[in-house]
């Protein structure tokens, strides 16, 4: 059983490192203007890794202290909050250039995605 788990984890690590893992970073790099691209990409990477570390570190504590289902309910609630935040606050940018989006954000007049 231990060898199967080790093999499965190794295959997951290899597959994620050669495929979808880099797609998010490539898109992330294209979101920022060239003069702030490196700082913006670094900050989002640090934020993502920090949240990943926090969720991984607290999972066992929450499962042991409050029951096995509690961490999943908490993670589901956070995702639900993120969904509604995106739906109600983040503006629609489909079909707009980076310059149009920047002008829209600076003016403060934008419609939510809804």
Image (cartoon, rainbow, N blue to C red):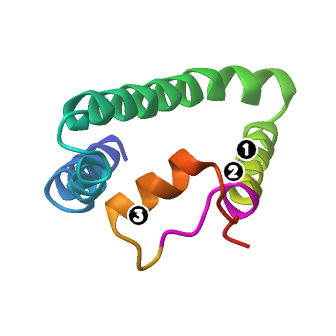
In the rendered view, does 91 fall on the left or right side of 50? right
* Res 72 quadrant in image: top right
For the magenta stretch, what is the residue range? 86-93
Camera-nearest label, 3 or 1: 3
The residue identified by callout 3 is 100
In the rendered view, does 44 fall on the left or right side of 110? left
Check if residue 3 falls in the magenta segment: no
Identify the mark at residue 78; answer none if there is no mark. 1
The residue identified by callout 2 is 82
Q: Are marks 1 and 2 in contact (CB under 8 Å)?
A: yes
Q: Helix, strand or loop at disc 3?
A: helix
List x then y, in percent, for residue 47. Answer: 45, 28
Q: Residue at x 70, y 64 (%)?
A: 112
Camera-nearest label, 1 or 2: 2
Disc 3 packing (10 Å; few <14; some 14–19; many ≥20): few
Camera-nearest label, 3 or 2: 3
* Real-space CA distance between mark 3 and mark 2, rounded to the nearest whole angstrom: 25 Å
Q: Residue at x 32, y 52 (%)?
A: 31
Q: Helix, strand or loop at disc 2?
A: helix
Disc 1 packing (10 Å; few <14; some 14–19; many ≥20): few
Q: Residue at x 71, y 64 (%)?
A: 87
Residue furthest left as drawn: 18
Q: Are marks 3 and 1 in contact (CB under 8 Å)?
A: no
Indicate whether 110 appears above or below 105.
Answer: below
* Real-space CA distance between mark 1 and mark 2, rounded to the nearest whole angstrom: 6 Å
List x then y, in percent, for residue 108. Answer: 63, 49
Q: Nearer the viewer, residue 17 or 79?
A: 79
In the rendered view, does 89 fall on the left or right side of 29? right
Disc 2 packing (10 Å; few <14; some 14–19; many ≥20): few
């Amino acid at each position: 059983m231990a060898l199967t788990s080790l093999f499965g984890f190794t295959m997951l690590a290899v597959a994620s490192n050669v495929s979808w893992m880099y797609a998010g970073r490539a898109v992330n790099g294209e979101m920022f203007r060239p003069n702030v691209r490196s700082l913006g990409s670094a900050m989002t990477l640090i934020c993502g890794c920090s949240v990943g570390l926090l969720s991984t570190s607290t999972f066992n504590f929450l499962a042991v202290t409050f029951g096995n289902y509690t961490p999943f309910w908490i993670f589901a609630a956070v995702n639900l909050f993120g969904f509604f935040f995106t739906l109600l606050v983040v503006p629609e940018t489909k079909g707009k250039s980076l310059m149009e989006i920047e002008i829209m954000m600076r003016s403060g007049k934008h419609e939510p995605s809804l």
